[in-house]
Image (spheres, helix red, strand yellow):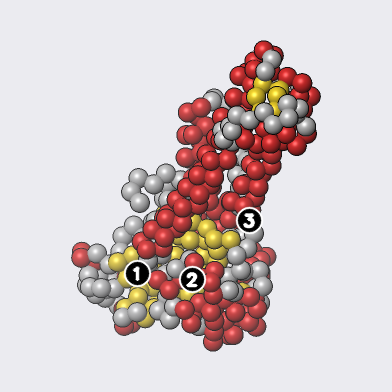
Amino acid sequence: MNGFVPGSHRRELANRSWTHEPLISLPARTASPLVELGRRALLALLLVGFVVALVWFDRHSYTDNYDGAVSLVDAIYYATVTITTTGYGDITPVTTTARLLNAILVTPLRIGFLVLLVGTTLQVLANQGRRIFKDGRWRKNMRNHVVVVGYGTKGKSAVDTLEANGTNPAQIVIIDGRPTAVSDANLRGFAAIEGDATRRDILRRAEIMKAREIIITLDRDDSAILVTLTVRQLNPRAHVVVAVREDDNASLVRQSGANAVITSSEAVGRLLGLSAVSPNLGTVIEDLLSSREGLEVGERQVTADEVGRAPGDVGGERVIAVVRNKTLRRFYDPTVARLETGDQVVVVRRASPDG
């Protein structure tokens, strides 16, 4: 999507266009079509009840062509046929006051009743139809996208890194079981699905079969293993990256089909140990992991003028590894002493402030 504006910047522009004061962003309240229709039907009954009371307390101003008197049943009958514009004419107001009340009160209520039921029903059905149409169009066009399972701290950091490295936000899909996480993802401009990612139907809704990259960042290792197994069955070709809490479970996740496994507890523990041994080492590693300032790690294609040169001769960056024939080789490996066409290099470079 060309010209993409980050979600926070879009909200800031929207606020400025309406007011100079910052506004609080409240979550949208939604209801199912049945609940919405039920609420409007109750309001319609209240309108009918108001007309019944109006006729009943002023029943002496009305006449019934059958027996002349207006009972409670007659009032209910008159209210329903009048407010629904049926109007058989067998019960009519005969006094000036009753006719004025019908003109001033009952007629607007009749119009409101029709707008309430017919208009709201059409609106609900139209909204649902539009949502189904948009969902179908999204599924048809979504392919080679990135699915992030779990939108907690790790998931958000992963998405931020994807954005910083040029991934189109329209190609990122979030799956999380918490409504707040889904709402947060929507506010940032990402498609999100609320549900349990261990269920096949939830994964299918995210078009997992056509995804190119799947990132799993769940709080429980057993759930991560089950999701990895299910994902690998649905999409054998995707690149799957999984975060686990304990190193003992890393081998199980790899056997389940993960291409890469990140052990969060071991990574944090190693960073803590290095910081204790040497604060400078911890600072440098933390700097490499952060984005938009200091140093960053990246991967790119070798340029034409770099072919034939040694990894250490690349200017402006420090080559730490070379990917050749889909195999990662360290910069000191003699097999990559000279860069070749088609190589990719993993480099340490100065971070770009704008990502």
Between marks 1 and 2, how big is the CA–CA gap? 35 Å
> The residue tagged with tag 2: helix, strand or loop?
helix
- Residue 314 placement (x, y as % from top left): 30, 64
Q: CA distance from mark 2 to mark 3?
A: 19 Å
Residue 338 in sight:
yes
Q: How many marks?
A: 3
User: Is mark 1 in CB contact (under 8 Å) with mark 2?
Assistant: no
Residue 198, which numbered label?
A: none
**Relative height, residue 25 to residue 31 (above, below):** above
Mark 1 element type: strand
Q: Earlier in the sequence, mark 2 or mark 3?
A: 3
What residue is shown at x 79% (from left), y 24% (from top)?
Answer: 57
In the rendered structure, which disc, 1 or 3, sits on the residue that comes first in sequence? 3
Q: Residue at x 58, y 55 (%)?
A: 182
The residue identified by callout 3 is 179
| Mark 1, residue position | 345
Choose mark 1 or mark 3, whichever is in front: 3
